[in-house]
Amino acid sequence: MASSTSLRSTRIPHNPFRFQKSLAYVVLINFVFLAVLQRSGYAVPVNAPLATLGGWINPLLWVNTVMLFVRAGQRIHFVSRLNGPVQGLLSIPRMFVNNLINFYAVCRAWRIYVGHLVSGKPIAWDKTSHTYLSNEALGKARSKIGEILVAWGVLTPEKLQASLETQLTCGKRLGELLMESSAISAVSLADAIAEQAELPRVSLDNVAVGHFAASLAFELQYAYRAVPFSTSDDGTLNVAVGRPLTQDEQDVVRRGAKANVAYFIASDAEITAELARHTRFAELARVRDGDAATLRVLPAEKTAGDQA
């Protein structure tokens, strides 16, 4: 819990400009309202000191306006490529709505943080609830990893076909073959797996993983490559995996964690790095590889097997 407090307290100061953006909206609405009144024939009083600053304010506002239109154009272009022209146009009003949402989120974060300083109430990880439409709701079939990567422009159809032909002879996973041939990065593969499995994405570099290592037995972490990295307000354990677990595997992890579990997709390299930090990683690796000198039944493994 202390780690969550430290994590939250270090993140709050990184968002001070949310207040300035919201204040800018108020000023913009005020100026638009005054401009409408002036166009309608109403006498609008002019602040003389402000008017005298027009020599440098006007060029600054024009530069800012041009940059705003460039950003909006880029957003429309890339959103349209991924989700269609309608979503591309809707991305413009969403820019303003998102800034307002972020503003209120920062206000709430400051309120919780100040309340913690005053009352000492611990700060828990506050995970935003996301709603993702299922493939059935979207009326489409589940895409394959290769199709997703090609659609994103990360992978060419020729490289995909070559990897599929190689897969027929070696039996390796497609993602593993693509990474071995340097066709894609580990991050792109994790993004595609998250897209296919309809699971949220997480980067383990941005969370305090070590503080939650005791939330799940390391034997289970190692067996299923599942790394706990936070807990939600309701006690749900957030776990990062490199691939979606089967229902039976999820049941084993849930019983081992003795809590509800929410799954996130992380890159395989990040999961390997976090598992390697554990003191028992080398021992379990030798057991997995069949080292006769160390091959033995571990008590914790028996417990995990009984639970399974």
Image: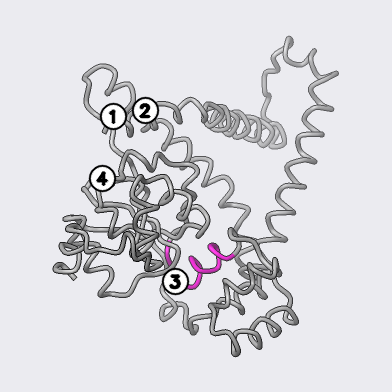
In the image: residue 194, left or right of residue 9: right
Q: Type of residue at label 3?
A: Ala
Would you say the magenta stretch is mainly helix, strand or loop? helix
Which is more N-terminal, label 1 or label 3? 1
Callout 1 secondary element: helix
Of residues 127 and 251, which is closer to you in this image? 251
| Camera-nearest label, 4 or 2 | 4
Which is more N-terminal, label 2 or label 3? 2
- What's the distance in space between the residues labelled 1 and 4, CA to CA? 15 Å
Does 260 appear in magenta? Answer: no
In the image: residue 59, left or right of residue 281: right
Of residues 12 and 289, which is closer to you in this image? 289
According to the picture, the residue beneath numbered tag 4 turns out to be: 214
According to the picture, the residue beneath numbered tag 3 turns out to be: 197
Residue positioned most to the top: 49
Which is more N-terminal, label 4 or label 1? 1
Q: Find out whether the residues at labels 4 and 3 contact each other: C-beta distance under 8 Å.
A: no
- What's the distance in space between the residues labelled 4 and 3, CA to CA? 27 Å
Which is more N-terminal, label 2 or label 4? 2
Q: Type of residue at label 4?
A: Ala
Q: Which mark is residue 272?
A: none
Which is more N-terminal, label 3 or label 4? 3
According to the picture, the residue beneath numbered tag 1 turns out to be: 2
Of residues 214 and 150, which is closer to you in this image? 214
Task: Relative to 275, say whether 296 is above or below.
Answer: below
The image shows residue 71 at horizontal and vertical percentages of: 72, 47
For the point 81% across and 26% down, the residue is: 58
- What's the distance in space between the residues labelled 3 and 2, CA to CA? 32 Å
In the image: residue 12, left or right of residue 115: right
Q: Which mark is residue 6?
A: 2
Q: Type of residue at label 1?
A: Ala
Of residues 51 and 122, which is closer to you in this image? 122
